[in-house]
Amino acid sequence: MSEASRCQRAAARLLSLAPAAVQAEAKGLQPLLERLLLCQLQGREPLQLDAAERAELTAASQSALQQLPVVLVEQGAQGAELWSRRQHQQQQSLLMELEQRLHQHRGLLLTGGAGTGKTTRVRELLADERERHTLLLAPTGKAAARLREALSPLPASMRCSTL
């Protein structure tokens, strides 16, 4: 059985077990739940909904989603994210722990997509901190190498490594 078929069956089963108010919205929710389940299978939760997809969700559909084990997170003009409740809770817990650790150790987390100026920003932030003991962490070896290259020569008080 294909992943798509498995997701289709799982979404139908979830909706069949849901309260009547949710089942009334099943036609609109089924494809959304199938896509979320497929994202989960592929390890790329949450499901990203663009602004147009988000606008298609009726008030009744949104109300029905609240009765399912999912969380709809608004992203303003960018649309929304649809999470399984468990994954969302784990993500929120992890973010809170990360925030506490960063605060405790006077850390900074800088994120962004490719070409958004992360390396330039790091260079600016560290320009006056050359003597302070600093540990730069990157998610991949390639990203760490890029940081090392952009900031070379690294002072002895500064290290760059992968997470």
Image (cartoon, grey):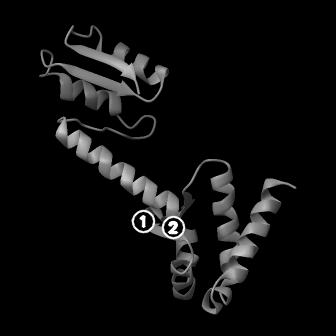
Extreme residue in the right direction: 1
Residue 77 horizontal/vertical position (percent): 42, 65
Image quarter of the N terminus: bottom right
Q: Which element type, helix, strand or loop, lies under badge 2? A: helix
Left or right: residue 26 versus residue 46 is: right
Kindly identify the residue that appears in the image at 30 percent across and 24 percent down. 136
- Label drawn at residue 148: none
> So how many labels did they put on this image?
2
Q: What is the three-letter code of the residue carrying label 1?
A: Ala
Mark 1 and mark 2 lie on one chain; the one further toward the N terminus is: 2
Left or right: residue 89 versus residue 99 is: right
Residue 138 horizontal/vertical position (percent): 39, 27
- The crowd level at tag 2 (other Cα within 10 Å; few <14, some 14-19, many 20+) is some
Q: What is the three-letter code of the residue carrying label 2?
A: Ala
Residue 76 horizontal/vertical position (percent): 40, 66
Kindly identify the residue that appears in the image at 53 percent across and 76 percent down. 55
Residue 93 horizontal/vertical position (percent): 37, 54
Q: Disc 1 marks which residue?
A: 77
Left or right: residue 162 versus residue 135 is: right
Residue 48, quarter of the rendered image: bottom right
Determine whether 128 is above or below 121 in the image. above
Determine whether 88 is above or below 74 in the image. above
Kindly identify the residue that appears in the image at 68 percent across and 52 percent down. 41
Q: Which element type, helix, strand or loop, lies under badge 1? A: helix
Kindly identify the residue that appears in the image at 48 percent across and 65 percent down. 79
Nearer the observer, 43 or 59: 43
Determine whether 130 is above or below 115 in the image. above
Q: Disc 2 marks which residue?
A: 51
Residue 116, quarter of the rendered image: top left
Asked if the residue at tag 2 contacts the one at tag 1, i.e. Cβ–Cβ closer than 8 Å, the answer is yes
Q: CA distance from mark 1 to mark 2?
A: 6 Å
Left or right: residue 30 versus residue 149 is: right
